[in-house]
Image (cartoon, helix red, strand yellow):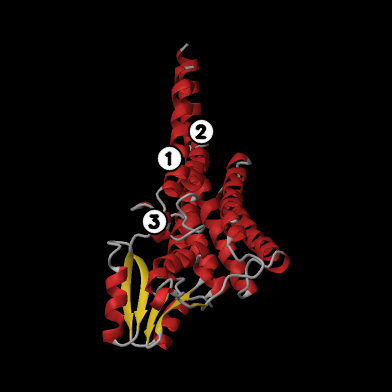
Amino acid sequence: MLTVIALVPLIVAFALWAFAWPSARTAPHDLPLGVAGPPAATEQVRAALEQRAGAFDLRTYANETEAREAIEKREVYGAVVAGPSGPELLTATAAGPVVAQLLEQATATMAPDGGKVPVDDVVAASPDDPRGAALSASVLPLALSGLAGGALVTLLRLRGTRAVGTLLATAALVGVVGAALAHSWLGVLTGNWWAEAAAIGLTSLAVGAAVAGLAALIGTPGIGLGALLIVLLGNPNSGVSSAPEMLPEPMGAIGQLLPPGAGGTLVRSVAFFDGHAVDTPVLVLTVWAVLGLLAVTVGGLRKESGDGPEAVRAGSSASALAGR
């Protein structure tokens, strides 16, 4: 009774901290932003942006063409182009509508004679999801699909190659179904269909393998630990609804090392940016998937040899009965 009474409030407090704290402290932290144009013209732009200490990671480009290429390659979230008639703002709502809106607000005072800074959306979000709400909402169901797959593999006592094959097949089907819903039906994603399916499937596999691997090593409590790690820590810090650089430090960086954050970044890159900047999220998801599958395999071998957690508990019970 005391354990339950003490544990439940702690879980609630952790959940509120995990979900509410990032929302309450949303602000740019070294957000990559380009500044393009002649050095003399960009000095004033840089000075105005640097007034917000620590907000932007300013990167200089020689001209507008280079700045556009940097946005398309996901090197920066936007760029301010200094020209003879005043600054122009280049944004990418596909990288995060919240960030694009923030950049508009940050450059609003740069317009000459109280005018308005012109804005060009270089990489636009899907017209069926202009605010990115549907894409942001898809992260939790994607994480839950992997969590359900890992939990079912554990509860149905699938081991070894059967468990690995089930996780791989489930992830592949999740990828196909996810792309069919998000791309073909809702129109939320607009990139290469099969690349999107692969990104969704890899994310689901990383989550499912991690949960099943934890459960294979420490028993069914591993499911709860996986849920805590993926849903309560990974989901709110994924940065999909805004950007990793908009989250309180160091949660943005930590979120990108967990499957929901890496998966959200990967799906966004293949859906809107022709696969640019996918190296890190693919590596993160692959490491989670490989380590999880290895744990599932090793855990299955331990159980078959009678050295697993269940076997140890069973042996202890048998010894106690024999002693009686």
CA distance separating discs 3 and 2: 47 Å
**Mark toward the start of the polypeptide (1 vs 2):** 1
Near mark 2 (Cα within 10 A), the count class, few <14, some 14-19 or many ≥20, is: some
Q: Nearer the viewer, mark 3 or mark 1?
A: 3
**Mark toward the start of the polypeptide (3 vs 1):** 1
Q: SS at mark 1?
A: helix
**Placement of 74 over or under 138, stated as above or below:** below
- Marks 3 & 1, CB-CB < 8 Å contact: no
Q: Which mark is residue 17?
A: 1
Near mark 1 (Cα within 10 A), the count class, few <14, some 14-19 or many ≥20, is: some
Q: Position of residue 167 (x, y in %)?
A: 59, 54
CA distance separating discs 1 and 2: 34 Å
Can residue 269 be seen from the camera position used here? Answer: yes
Q: Nearer the viewer, mark 1 or mark 2?
A: 1
Near mark 3 (Cα within 10 A), the count class, few <14, some 14-19 or many ≥20, is: some
CA distance separating discs 3 and 1: 17 Å
**Mark toward the start of the polypeptide (3 vs 2):** 3
* Residue at the limit of the structure toward the top, as seen here: 324
Res 40 quadrant in image: bottom left
Query: The disc labelled 1 sits on which kind of residue?
Result: Trp
**Placement of 259 over or under 103, stated as above or below:** above
Query: The disc labelled 3 sits on which kind of residue?
Result: Ala
Taking depth in this image into account, of 99 and 267 the one nearest to the observer is 99
Residue under label 2, please give it.
310
Q: Residue at x 56, y 57 (%)?
A: 136
Relative to 92, is 130 on the left or the right? right
Query: The disc labelled 2 sits on which kind of residue?
Result: Glu
Can residue 307 be seen from the camera position used here? Answer: no
**Placement of 213 over or under 318, stated as above or below:** below
Residue under label 3, please give it.
27
Q: Position of residue 132 (x, y in %)?
A: 58, 62
